Amino acid sequence: MKILYITSIALLLISCSEKETKAENNTEKHNPSFANNIKTIKATSGNQNEELTLTGKVDYDPDKVINYISLVNGIADRSYFSLGDKVQKGQVLLDVRSSDLSSLQADAVSAESDVKIAQRELLTAQSLYEDNMLSEKELLEAQAKVKQAQATYNKIQSDMGVHGINKGNGMFSIKSPMTGYIVTKNVSSGSTVSTDGEPLFTVADLSTVWIVANVYASNLQFVKEGMEVDITTLSYPGEIFKGKISSLSQIFDPEEKVLKARIILDNKDLKLKPEMSVVIKLKGETFYEFVSVPTDALIFDDDRYFVIVKDNEGFKSKEVQLQGHNRKITYIASGLSAGDDIVVNNQLLIYAGLKEN
C-alpha cells in the first residue's frame, strides 16, 4: 500500500509538471515579444481572379505562307531541296518537264521570229517612204505590225515567267516565291505533277507564328481579347513565352467544340515550330466580389480550412469556406470580413497553441 501511495503521488506531480510546461509554452507563444514578430495582412474584397490553363498549338502566320501548286501537268525532273531547308526568294527548287511548256516555248520562238520579220519590213517601209515610194498610211501599218508582234512576244514571255526559268526542251525551273523554310514537300524527282494535285511544296516565314488556344464554353467568361498570357512547352522546360490574345473567334469549331483564341508571337530565334503543342496560362476575372487572402495563410486541418486572425484581444482561429483560389490568392465564400488582420507567418504555431487551450 505504501508503494502504491508513493507511485500515485509521483504520477500526480508529473501530470502537474506537464501542465505547467504546456502553460509555459502557450505563454511563450503569446508573449509580447512573440506577438511583435507576427506579420499580418488585411483581407481585401475584390473581383475573383482565376488562373486558367488552356491547351493549344503553334501554327503558321497565314500572311507569311505560300503553297506552290503546279500550273501545268508534267514530270518533276529534279528536286533541289529537302523538307526543313531554308530557301531564299528566287532560289531554284525544282525542274519540271511538260508538253504544255514545250508548246509555250514553241510559241515564244515563233513570236520572236514574227517580231524580227516585222522589224525588217518596217525598215524597208521607212526606206521606201523616204523615197516617196510608199504612202504614210502604209508606213503606219508597218509600225503597227511591229508593235503587235512585240506585244504578242511579250505576253508569251510573261506567261513563261509565271512557270519559272525557261531551260528549253519543255523544261522550266521553279523558283522559291519567298524567303523562308520548306515546311511541306509533296514532290520528288520523277514524280508526276498536275494542276489539280496537292501543293508541290510550302514555304513559310517562321519569324512570326500564331499560337492557337482552345477555349471551352465554361471558360468564356474569363477569356477576353488583349489579355496577357504565359506560354510554355515541353521542348523548353522552365522557359516562358509571353504574349497577348489578339483575337477570339465568335464561332465554335464544329469538330473540337471550342472557340479558337489567337496569340501572335515573334519567333526570330525559331524555337517555336508549327504543330508544336503548348500550354497557355492566363488570369481570368469574374464580376463577383469576394474576400481574398494570401493562399499561404491557409491552414488545412481535419478536412477544413482555417486562418489566424489578430484583433485587440489577441489571436483567434477562424474556419473559412473557400470560393476559389490560384497560386497566390484564395477567395473566401464565408468566415471572414474585408479588413480582418490575417496572420501570414508562424500561423501554424499559433494554431497549435490555440488548439491546445
Image (spheres, rainbow, N blue to C red):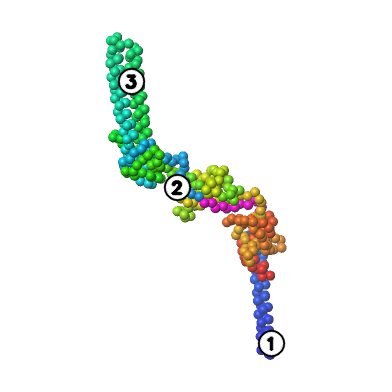
Residue 34 visible here: no
Seen as rendered, the residue at the extreme bottom is: 1
Whether pointer 2 and pointer 1 mark residues with C-beta atoms closer than 8 Å, the reply is no
Q: Point out the tag, 2 or 3, that comes first from the N-terminus.
A: 3
| Residue count near mark 3 (Cα–Cα under 10 Å), binned few <14, some 14–19, many ≥20 | many
Tag 2, which secondary structure?
Answer: loop
Q: Point out the tag, 2 or 1, that comes first from the N-terminus.
A: 1
Which residue is rendered at x = 34% and y = 23% of the image? 150
Q: For residue 274, which numbered disc appears in the image?
A: 2
Disc 1 marks which residue? 5
Q: For residue 272, which numbered disc appears in the image?
A: none
Residue 48 within the segment the image draws in magenta = yes
Quick one: 235 or 277, which is closer to the camera? 277
Q: Amino acid at mark 3?
A: Val
Question: What are the residue bounds of the magenta stretch?
Answer: 44-55
Which residue is rendered at x = 48% and y = 49% of the image? 57
Determine whether, in the image, residue 55 is placed left or right of residue 67.
right
| Residue count near mark 2 (Cα–Cα under 10 Å), binned few <14, some 14–19, many ≥20 | some
Disc 3 marks which residue? 146
Picture coordinates of residue 282 (x, y %)? Answer: 55, 50
Foreground tag (2 vs 3): 3
